Image (cartoon, rainbow, N blue to C red):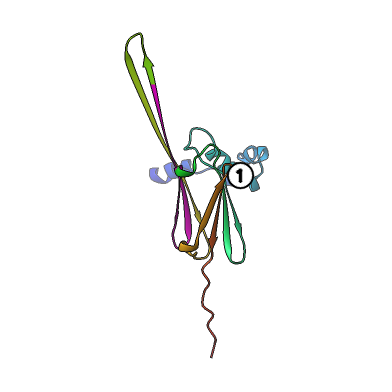
Amino acid sequence: MANENSRKSNLPEDPIKEWFNFAPLFQERPFRNLLESIDELFQHTYFKPRFKVKVQEEEDKYIVYAELPGVRKNQIHIHTMINRLTITVKQTEMETIENDKTQTTHNKQSYTQVSRTIPFYQPVLEKQTKATYRDGLLTVIVPKRKGKMIEIE
């Protein structure tokens, strides 16, 4: 009997009343923007730095635009698989500070790697993928793989 009483005490008396206690949370920002809120959460500085990507789908290809300001062409690596594209940016910075007074040299090196993987709904042709990089904008054209039409007998 004691077990049943302890279980009942953990349950809310009126579940509907408990639900409406959460109403102020949804009044501040509508529920339909929940995904936008999650995106904003991951764009804060305490998470790994990211870069913006836009995907445009056409009948025979995908066009991927990546904003990479301040990145050199040799720091960008693109890898394609059957149904995805990964863009990786690897940056290494070296700084040397020489102090003539104490005759010391201080070397500082930092390494940053950021990547984004873009999934595709259809398989792509990896070997025919082409990329260009101008003025901080990477454009990758990924042709779609065509399926085989099967005639019904």
Q: Is residue 125 above or below residue 114?
A: below
Check disc 1 and report the residue beneath it: 36
The secondary structure making up most of the magenta span is: strand
Q: Is residue 117 above or below residue 102?
A: below
Query: Percent from the top left, x then y, of residue 7?
Result: 43, 44
**Front residue of this view, candidates 86 and 14:** 86
Residue at 53% x, 36% y is 70
Query: Percent from the top left, x then y, of residue 65?
Result: 58, 50
**Front residue of this view, candidates 58 and 21:** 58
**Front residue of this view, candidates 92 and 36:** 92
The outermost residue toward the bottom is 153
Label count reads 1
Instruction: Tell me the magenta residue range.
Output: 75-96
**Front residue of this view, candidates 100 and 120:** 100
Callout 1: SS:
helix
Residue type, numbered disc 1 = Glu
Q: Is residue 103 above or below residue 11?
A: above
- Whether residue 29 appears in magenta in the rendering, the answer is no
- Whether residue 91 appears in magenta in the rendering, the answer is yes
The outermost residue toward the front is 100
Residue density around tag 1, few if under 14, some if 14–19, many if 20 or more, within 10 Å = few
The outermost residue toward the top is 101
Query: Percent from the top left, x then y, of residue 43?
Result: 54, 38
Query: Percent from the top left, x then y, of residue 148?
Result: 51, 77
